[in-house]
Image (cartoon, rainbow, N blue to C red):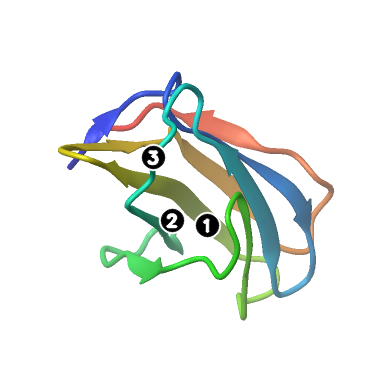
Amino acid sequence: MWLADPELVSARVVSIGQTNMNISWSTGSTDVINDTFIKYKEVLQISWITVQPTSPGSHVISPLLPGHTYEIYVVIHSFDKTVMSDILENSTGEPFLSVKKKAQ
């Protein structure tokens, strides 16, 4: 697992739908980003799904299953350093509430 550094990358869930979540992130003082990946999975699953965002700073994750809880984090590669955001935990189709979990 990568180093969690919220000062270099912080993520948040912007909105939640029945089958999607819109997330955004900021990269703090990091000026040069080589790669960005979003990793997510259902809470009780073992395997993470990796997607590469199509635009800088935000991405809509879909399709997700309605009423399921997901863990999400953002990974930033910058020069020789790789950092990740805290893990966010959210459920689809429920009132908006984002829970941050410390990366393990």
Which label lies toward us, 3 or 1?
A: 3
Q: Label 1's element?
A: strand
Question: Label 1 amino acid?
Answer: Tyr
Question: Label 2 amino acid?
Answer: Val
**What residue is disc 2 on?**
43
Residue, x 33% and y 32% (percent of image)?
Answer: 103
In this image, 101 relative to 100: left or right? left
Decide which of tag 2 and tag 3 comes sooner along the chain. 3
In this image, 49 relative to 62: left or right? left
**Quarter-of-image position of residue 97:** top right
Question: Callout 3: 10 Å neighbours few (<14), some, many (20+)?
Answer: few
State the separation of the CA atoms marked 2 and 3: 32 Å
Could you tell me if the residues under marks 2 and 1 are in contact, i.e. CB atoms within 8 Å? yes
Residue 19 locus on image (x, y percent):
71, 75
**What residue is disc 3 on?**
32
Residue 95 vs 101, above or below: the answer is below
Residue 49 locus on image (x, y percent):
36, 70
Residue, x 35% and y 45% (percent of image)?
Answer: 76
Which label lies toward us, 2 or 3?
A: 3
**What residue is disc 1 on?**
70
